[in-house]
């Protein structure tokens, strides 16, 4: 088969792709959720189980997504269509690409609202609004933000513009240039915060919370939590990795590259925990505060510590950069499809998509105030979009992708694109993708729906 070329461009190197995909994977969940669930479910024991789940679920499916993207060299929709036709399958398989691109767009609409909160806190930290603030005051401050649609609209709008300014530049002038700047910045900010946490006097307590090897705290529920997070943490099922894979250099190893991304994503999450929890423990606060950890607990902690204003600003800047890199990958699949389908230039495609995401985002931010009485299936707009994407579209997309690559694509297509040198390694991956990964994702799918609907 003649090598396809992407009309959008190609990453300059394998490492640029690694940084871009890691940027997609590293988001708000890495900053608070993974460190928290690690501490609650047995520390080091949970990390080991999580790594096994990454190897059996995350890595195999991610390799499948990259494989389809690079083989098709198009948007997720057209890459799935082209690879299906190459294997003599129906073009209707492109619905799998549609679901991923649509899921990414839907996630962006409410993700941009949360990112807007982060921008608000960056400005507040820079302004010294949280100096000597108490927990009740911090809670009231966050509630006041949720009750102020005008304020949320300003920051939501700023974030949408920031994202589309990158996407409009295309692969090399937009995504790649931003990745080369933002990912090193994210690593530097993380290391600065880690250094700061050494000075709190509670660094050992934070390490103990994260890494104490407690088999007693490891339950079957812990295994299911690790299984679910191993799937969601790598941005699977939302078209982002499939789109980024379309720009991957042909000579880069898919297996080694994806493994590196999985390791980096896990390391960032653990280092974030090592940076955050000593600060939490130094101020006698609850490490299991969930989303409130970012917007209520930590502002209080930073406000009461020497140098807290500076490092609080750096922390929210870190969270903002992580949200930015993730959001860029959410909008790329749909943008690429608009360019391919209608022959649009990047600018009008981004204006159209950015406006649509901004408009739906207004309904999401209105869920906390002027649209709080509007519900879909008993949920406000924000919660409904979160529920549909996280509990239905993403796991279903991952399940179908594993089935598509494992059972329907011609083996010669899969084998030639992966180019794994050792036949045994290829057969092991193929076996896991065909049998283990679909069963694991089906469990995630069923349990998520059961827990939400029960």
Image (cartoon, rainbow, N blue to C red):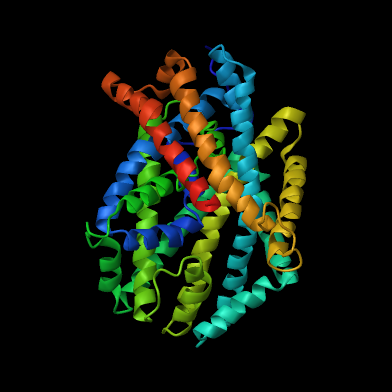
> Is 43 situated left or right of 261 in this image?
left
Quarter of the figure with residue 277:
bottom left
Name the spot of residue 287 as percent of width and height, x first. Answer: 39, 71
Is 117 placed left or right of 135 in the picture?
right
Q: Is residue 8 visible?
A: no
Q: How many marks?
A: 0
- Above or below for 313 versus 140: above
Residue that lies at the very extreme toward the front in this rendered image:
454
Query: Of residues 436 and 29, which is closer to you in this image?
Result: 436
Residue sticking out furthest to the bottom: 132
In the depicted structure, whether residue 289 falls above or below residue 443: below
Query: Going 58% across and 25% down the picture, which residue do you hit?
Result: 80
Residue 122 in sight in this render: yes
Left or right placement of residue 264 versus residue 110 in this view: left
The percent coordinates of residue 7 (x first, y second) are: 64, 28
**197 sits to left or right of 20:** left
Work out whether residue 289 or residue 424 is closer to the camera in this orientation and state it. Answer: 289
Residue sitting nearer the eye, 396 or 84: 396
């Amino acid at each position: 088969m003649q090598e396809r070329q992407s009309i959008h461009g190609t990453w300059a190197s394998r490492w640029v792709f690694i940084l871009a995909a890691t940027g997609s994977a590293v988001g708000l969940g890495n900053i608070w959720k993974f460190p928290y669930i690690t501490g609650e479910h047995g520390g080091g024991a949970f990390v080991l189980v999580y790594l096994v789940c990454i190897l059996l679920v995350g890595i195999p499916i991610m390799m499948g997504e990259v494989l389809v993207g690079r083989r098709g060299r198009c948007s997720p929709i057209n890459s799935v269509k082209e690879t299906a036709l190459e294997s003599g399958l129906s073009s209707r398989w492109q619905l799998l690409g549609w679901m991923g691109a649509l899921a990414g767009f839907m996630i962006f609409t409410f993700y941009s609202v949360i990112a807007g909160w982060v921008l608000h806190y960056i400005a507040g930290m820079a302004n010294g609004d949280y100096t000597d603030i108490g927990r009740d005051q911090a809670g009231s401050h966050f509630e006041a933000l949720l009750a102020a649609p005008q304020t949320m609209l300003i920051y939501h709008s700023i974030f949408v513009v920031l994202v589309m300014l990158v996407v409009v530049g295309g692969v090399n002038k937009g995504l790649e240039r931003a990745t080369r700047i933002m990912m090193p910045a994210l690593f530097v900010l993380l290391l600065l915060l880690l250094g700061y946490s050494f000075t709190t006097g509670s660094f050992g307590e934070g390490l103990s919370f994260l890494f104490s090897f407690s088999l007693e705290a490891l339950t079957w529920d812990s295994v299911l939590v690790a299984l679910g997070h191993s799937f969601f943490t790598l941005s699977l099922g939302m078209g982002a990795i499939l789109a980024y894979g379309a720009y991957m250099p042909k000579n880069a190893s898919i297996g080694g590259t994806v493994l590196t991304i999985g390791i980096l994503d896990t390391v960032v999450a653990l280092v974030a925990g090592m940076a955050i929890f000593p600060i939490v423990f130094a101020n006698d606060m609850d490490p299991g505060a969930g989303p409130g950890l970012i917007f209520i607990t930590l502002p209080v902690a930073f406000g009461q510590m020497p140098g807290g204003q500076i490092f609080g600003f750096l922390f929210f800047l870190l969270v903002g950069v992580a949200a930015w890199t993730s959001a860029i990958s959410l909008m790329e699949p749909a943008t690429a499809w608009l360019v391919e389908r209608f022959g649009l230039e990047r600018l009008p495609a981004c204006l159209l998509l950015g406006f649509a995401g901004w408009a739906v985002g207004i309904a999401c931010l209105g869920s906390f105030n002027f649209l709080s009485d509007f519900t879909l299936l008993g949920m406000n707009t924000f919660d409904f979009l979160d529920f549909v994407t996280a509990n239905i579209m993403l796991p279903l997309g991952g399940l179908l992708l594993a089935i598509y690559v494992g059972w329907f694509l011609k083996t010669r297509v899969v084998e030639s694109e992966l180019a794994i040198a050792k036949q045994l390694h290829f057969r092991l991956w193929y076996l896991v993708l065909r049998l283990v990964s679909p069963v694991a994702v089906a469990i995630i799918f069923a349990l998520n729906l059961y827990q939400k609907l029960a």
